[in-house]
Image: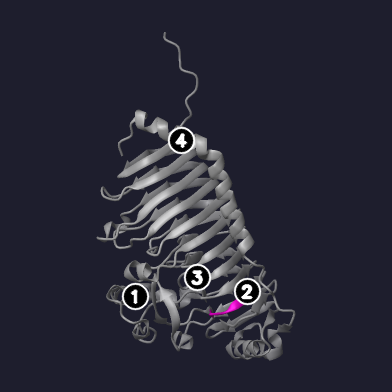
Amino acid sequence: MKLYLAFLIPILIGACKSADKHVESVNDIKSNILKSIPKVKISDNIVSITNFGAKGDSVTDNKPAFDKALKTCKEKNGCKLSVPAGTYLVNGPIHLSSNTSIDLNDGAKLVFGTNAHDYLPAVATSWEGTFLYNYSPLIYAYKASNVAITGKGTIDGNGANGFSKWYDLQKADQQLSRQMNHDGTPVNKRMFGKGHFLRPQLIQFYECKNVLVEGVKIINSPFWSVHFLKSENITARKVKFNAFNRNNDGFDPEYSRNVFIEDIDFNNSDDNVAIKAGRDHEGRKTAAPCENIIIRNCRFKGLHGVVIGSEMSAGVQNVFVENCTYAGDCKRGIYLKSNADRGGFIRKVYVNNLTFGKVEDGIYITSNYHGEGKGHVTDISQVYFNNIKFNNAANSGLVIQGYPGKKVNNINFSNISIDTCANAISFTNAENIILGNLIIGKQATTPSAAK
C-alpha cells in the first residue's frame, strides 16, 4: 500500500465532517435490526418427555419417545417439550416442527448415538456452502417457524465417538460436492448419506423463521455446532460451548438475516462465529446475502473470534460486533477471508469495543485465502474497527491482503492498541485506509532532551 500524507489529510477531514451523520445512520441500522426480530412465541402447552416413555438413565434409547412426543406436538400445532434432569440417549435425529420448543431442565443431558445409519434417510441440507442431501443434522428444523431450544441442560453430539472420525475420510466427498456446485448439478442429484463421509451438523435450522437458542450448553459436536441456514429472525443468547472436534464452529449463520447473538461463552476448536453466504457458483447464483447480524457481550475462546467467510459468495453486509472480551487465547481476533473463487462482497462491518488476550494475528483481512481461485475476486470495503485492544499478537497485528485489480478499500482503524506484537502492520493491495490513534507496542512519551 502506498500512503501519501497529502492524500490522507483530505480523507481524514472528510471523515470528521461526516462522522456524526455516519454514527447516527449506523445506530439506526442496528436499532432497526433489533426491532425487526420478534420474540419467539413459546407454546403454553407444556408436556414432559417422560410422558412418552423417555428415561434419563443413559441406557434407554429415547428416540421413539422423542418421535412420539414431537408428533403429538405437531398434531396440536405446537408445544413446549420439557426434558427433566437425567441423561437421555437418543439414537437418531430430533426433527422440530413449527411452534415447538425443547426445554432442557437443569441437569438434563441429550447424548446422541453414534450409528450413522440412524441418521438416514438423507435430508435437504448444506455442507460447506453447497446445497445437497446428507445425513440428518442431530437436531433439525426445516421450513419451521417459532422454534426454540432452551434451558440449562446440555446437548452432547457424541462426535468424538462417532461422526468426527470421518474427518480423514471426507476429502473425496468434499471435492465431489464442490464439483457439483461448480457444474450446477441439480440439488436432487447431489445425494450423499450412505456410502459417503460428510459429517452432519449438530443443530441446523434450515429456511426457518423466528428461532431461539438460549441457555443450553453445547459440547462434542460432530461438525459445525449450530447452523442457521437461509433463516431469519434469530436470537441466540447465554449459550455455552465446549466443542473441540474438527470444524467445531460455534454459530454459523449462512444466507440468513436478522441475527442477534448475545452473552455467549465460547470455547471451540474452530471459529466462534463464522458468517457465511454460500460457496462459489452456487452462492453467486443464490444471491441471498447474509445480513443484519449483531454479536455483542460475548466471551471468545478458540480458533478465531468472529470470521466472515470463506464461503460468502452471495455477500455479507451490516455486521455489528461490539462489547466483547476473551475467555482464553484465539488464533485470530477478527478474520475476514475470501479468495478469487468466491466473488460477492463484504461490506458495512462495524467492530467496536473488543478486548483480546493472546492471539496469533489481531485483525486479518484477506482476498487470497489458501491462495486459491480465479475470476471472482471479492469486493471488501467499508469496514470499521474502533476501540480494540490486544494484549499480545504473536505474529501480526493488522493485515490486509487485496489484489492489484481489486484492492481492499475504505477500511478504518481507530483507537487500536496492541501491547506486544512481532509484526505490526502488513498492508498489500489496499487503498483508502484510515488510521487513527494506533498504539502498537509501547506508547511513546515526552521526547527526551538532547544531552
Alpha-carbon span between mark 3 and mark 1: 19 Å
User: What residue is disc 4 on?
Assistant: 14
User: What residue is disc 1 on?
Assistant: 170
- Percent coordinates x, y for residue 106 in the rendering: 70, 71
User: What residue is disc 3 on?
Assistant: 227
- Percent coordinates x, y for residue 6 in the rendering: 35, 28
Residue 117 is drawn in which quadrant? Answer: bottom left
Name the dominant secondary structure of the magenta segment: strand
| Of residues 34 and 132, the one drawn nearer to the viewer in this rendering | 34
Q: Amino acid at mark 3?
A: His
Residue 146 on the magenta segment: yes
User: What residue is disc 2 on?
Assistant: 148
Identified at 50% across, 35% down, the residue is 16
In this view, the mark in front (3 or 1): 3
Mark sitting earlier along the chain (3/1): 1
Residue 411 is drawn in which quadrant? Answer: top left
Q: Amino acid at mark 2?
A: Ala
Callout 2 secondary element: strand
Mark sitting earlier along the chain (4/1): 4
Callout 4 secondary element: helix
Mark sitting earlier along the chain (4/2): 4
Which image quadrant: the N terminus?
top left
Q: Amino acid at mark 4?
A: Gly
**Number of other residues with Cα within 10 Å of mark 4, as a class: few under 14, some 14 to 19, many 20 or more:** few
Q: Seen from this angle, which residue lies furthest top?
A: 451
Q: Which residues are magenta?
A: 142-147
